[in-house]
Image (tube, rainbow, N blue to C red):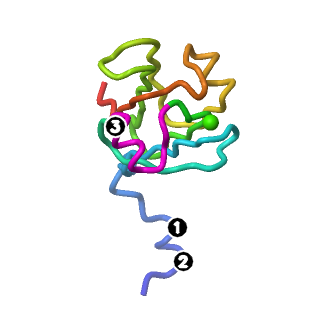
Amino acid sequence: MQNIRDALTTPDVIPSPVQETPCTVDLCLDDNFNNCKTVEEGYFNMGSLADRGIPNDSVESLRVNGQPGCAITLHQHGNDGGWKITLHEGEYTCANIEELGGKCNDMSTCKVFRDET
Ligand SMILES: [Ca+2]
């Protein structure tokens, strides 16, 4: 058994890199992170969002979870049309989304991904 002195003086031989965790996003139908549905990495069109309980033009706040580099791109329409914003790990209220160039209750498609750059 290791005594306490050894435990205190044993150097960390392995540097601790960022632990990679899955990228997920809580898409919330109401502001301030209420009524959220969680989606994993991938591209979601209107139909696949609806299948997950997220009707068209209903997202009002969201939370990007996981690391490193987890992100979501929100699109106003399909096919890359309309406004588009990319958000990295963190929490975004309706006001935050609008400050960043998006709109609340106006997103139709999105992509959750790990931004390797
Ligand atoms: Ca809403």
Residue carrying label 1: 8
Amino acid type at circle 1 is: Leu
Looking at the rendering, in which quadrant would you find the C terminus? top left
Number of numbered callouts drawn:
3
Q: Which residue occupies 38% across, 49% down?
A: 51
- Residue 72 found in image quarter: top left
Q: Residue 63's mark?
A: none
Picture layout, residue 103 above or below residue 28: above
Ligand 1 contact, mark 1 (Cβ < 8 Å): no
Residue carrying label 3: 44
Q: Which image quadrant shows ligand 1?
A: top right
Q: Is residue 16 left or right of residue 7?
A: left
Q: Mark 3 packing: few (<14 Cα in 10 Å), some, or many (20+)?
A: many
Ligand 1 contact, mark 2 (Cβ < 8 Å): no
Q: Are marks 3 and 2 in contact (CB under 8 Å)?
A: no
Separation (CA) of disc 1 from disc 2: 6 Å
Indicate the secondary structure of the residue bearing disc 1: helix
Q: Position of residue 25 (x, y in %)?
A: 47, 43
Residue carrying label 2: 4
Q: Which residue occupies 64% across, 16% down?
A: 99
Amino acid type at circle 3 is: Phe
Q: What range is drawn magenta here?
A: 44-56
Task: Single out the mark in the foreground, 3 or 1.
Answer: 3
Q: Is residue 33 left or right of residue 79?
A: right
Indicate the secondary structure of the residue bearing disc 3: strand
Q: Position of residue 59 (x, y in %)?
A: 56, 35
Q: Are marks 1 and 2 in contact (CB under 8 Å)?
A: yes
In front of the other: 66 or 59: 59
Separation (CA) of disc 3 from disc 2: 52 Å
Looking at the rendering, in which quadrant would you find the N terminus? bottom left
Amino acid type at circle 2 is: Ile
For marks 3 and 2 on the same chain, the one whose residue lies earlier in the sequence: 2
